[in-house]
Image (cartoon, grey):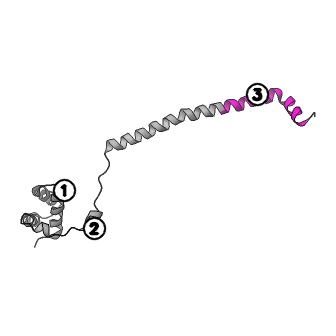
Amino acid sequence: MVKEDILIAIKNATERGESLQKASATLISAGYSPEDVDEASKAADMGIISAIPKDESQEKTQIKPLPKLEDKIASLTSDATKSKKKIPGTITILLIALGILAGIFVIFLLFGEKILSSLFGSA
């Protein structure tokens, strides 16, 4: 009796363009018995495989391929470059604000009494 799971695996592999021999070798290396795989391969050769209806649940649970490592590295380095460009502008703005505050403090130290007396009247 042909095991249906092996037959479905062979069908899926051949639909993806793999040869019947490669699909059989993959199943045997995955732990299926060579006798069961050979029996399913012969059944597939005889055309039984086309009679198996498509299993929609298998299509939904297929694993998507991972993104290439080069693409991931490129996206990470571009993100780092973008953040590095923002840092000098932020530092410049903070230094300007600090300079303005320091200037106000120095002016207040030098002319504080005059400024306060002109704002609040003579004390």
**Residue 37 shown in magenta:** no
What's under tag 2, amino acid-wise? Ser
- Indicate which disc, 3 or 1, sits on the residue closer to the N terminus: 1
What's under tag 1, amino acid-wise? Arg
Mark 1 lies on residue? 16
Residue in front for this viewpoint, 34 or 4: 4
Q: For residue 24, which quarter of the picture?
A: bottom left
Mark 3 lies on residue? 106
Question: Mark 1 Cα within 10 Å, few/some/many (few <14, many 20+)?
Answer: few
Local secondary structure at mark 2: helix
Q: Are marks 3 and 2 in contact (CB under 8 Å)?
A: no
Local secondary structure at mark 3: helix
Residue 49 percent location from the top left of the image:
12, 66
In this picture, which residue range is highlighted in magenta?
A: 97-120
Local secondary structure at mark 1: loop
Mark 2 lies on residue? 57
Q: For residue 93, which quarter of the picture?
A: top right
Q: For residue 4, which quarter of the picture?
A: bottom left
Residue drawn at (41%, 41%) of the image? 76
What's under tag 3, amino acid-wise? Val
Residue drawn at (21%, 67%) of the image? 54
Disc 2 to disc 1, C-alpha distance: 17 Å
Residue 32 percent location from the top left of the image:
15, 64
Q: How many marks?
A: 3
Disc 3 to disc 2, C-alpha distance: 75 Å
* Quarter occupied by the N terminus: bottom left
- Indicate which disc, 2 or 1, sits on the residue closer to the N terminus: 1
- Indicate which disc, 3 or 2, sits on the residue closer to the N terminus: 2
Judge depth for marks 3 and 1 and give the one in front. Answer: 1
Task: Left or right? Give the position of 70 relative to 54.
Answer: right
Question: Mark 3 Cα within 10 Å, few/some/many (few <14, many 20+)?
Answer: few
